[in-house]
């Protein structure tokens, strides 16, 4: 299931709705930062320091100052409006942890694929993963300082996205910017799920 009813109630007295959203993307693209910036609770992080042994398998090109990496997941929660909360699960970015993605994606309504235009190819695996499993996703371009600026259409063409897949620009460090990305995911995933239901009825 893509959502669950929580034990709490919304402002109108009805059951509160909790939706599961994944935050994915390449190594060092800002997944942990985004979850931490928007979460209204202290985020759960499973970070470990990068080791010399890890240099043999982790490509740190373009993220030379990165000293830690997520080895399981990040977790946070944000209330979008009264009665609607999002549970955020940040996925690990390295190839060797991809086996965790299948478990994390169970029951997800949709996903955010964070992209860095300096290393755009790093988000191809996440795009392929969600397209193959028909999980609605939004590509969010994390606008790093010093990176060349590209428009949403340029990124969409470069990633060869399916028609209609949203591409948005964001700053993963900024709570309001991250919240807008999450709202876009919920809206887009809602439209996709509604269309599928109508197709089955038709």
Image: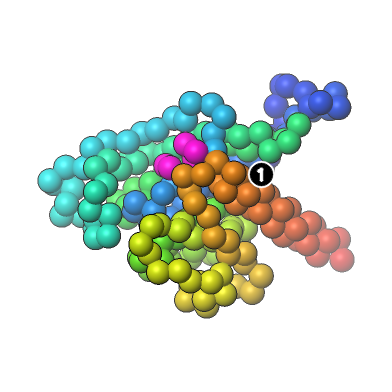
Q: In this view, does 160 lie above or below 102?
A: below
Residue that numbered label 1 is attached to: 2
Position of the C terminus, as image quadrant, is bottom right
Q: x%, y% of residue 68?
A: 27, 41
Coloration of the structure image: rainbow
Name the spot of residue 106 as percent of width and height, x first.
56, 44
Magenta-drawn stretch contains 35 = yes
Q: In the displayed image of the protein, which residue is found farthest to the front?
A: 146
Q: In this view, does 199 lie above or below 180?
A: below
Give how far across and how far down residue 25 sits, in percent.
Answer: 43, 55
The residue drawn where x is 85% and y is 23% is 13
Residue drawn at (59%, 44%), measured in percent from left and top?
176
Residue 112 in the magenta stretch? The answer is no
Residue at x 62%, y 67% (from the top left corner): 165
Q: Is residue 201 visible?
A: yes
Q: Give the range drawn in magenta.
A: 32-37
Q: What element carries label 1?
A: loop
Q: Is the magenta stretch mostly helix, strand or loop?
A: helix
Furthest residue to the left?
52
The residue at 48%/71% (across/down) is: 150
Residue 122 can be seen in this image: no
Residue sitting nearer the eye, 71 or 68: 68
Q: Residues within 10 Å of mark 1 (few under 14, many from 20)?
A: some
* Image quadrant in which you'd find residue 79: top right
Query: Relative to the observer, which residue lies in front, 92 or 32?
Result: 32
Q: What is the x, y in percent for residue 151?
A: 53, 71
Count of residue discs: 1
Q: Quadrant of the N terminus?
A: top right
Instruction: Determine which quarter of the picture holds residue 6.
Output: top right
Image height check: is 46 above or below 123?
above
């Amino acid at each position: 299931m893509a959502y669950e009813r929580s034990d709490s109630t919304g402002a109108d007295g009805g059951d509160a709705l909790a939706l599961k959203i994944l935050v994915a993307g390449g190594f060092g693209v800002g997944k942990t930062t985004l979850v931490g910036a928007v979460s209204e609770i202290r985020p759960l992080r499973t970070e470990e320091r990068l080791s010399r042994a890890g240099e043999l398998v982790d490509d740190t090109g373009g993220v030379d100052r990165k000293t830690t990496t997520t080895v399981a997941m990040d977790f946070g929660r944000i209330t979008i409006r009264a009665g609607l909360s999002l549970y955020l699960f940040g996925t690990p970015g390295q190839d060797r942890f991809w086996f965790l993605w299948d478990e994390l994606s169970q029951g997800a309504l949709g996903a955010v694929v964070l992209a860095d235009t300096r290393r755009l190819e790093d988000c191809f695996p996440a795009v392929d993963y969600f397209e193959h499993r028909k999980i609605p996703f939004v590509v969010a371009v994390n606008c790093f300082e010093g990176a060349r600026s590209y428009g949403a259409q340029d990124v969409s063409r470069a990633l060869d996205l399916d028609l209609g897949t949203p591409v948005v620009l964001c700053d993963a460090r900024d709570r309001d910017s991250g919240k807008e990305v999450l709202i876009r995911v919920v809206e887009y995933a809602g439209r996709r799920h509604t269309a599928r239901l109508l197709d089955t009825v038709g």
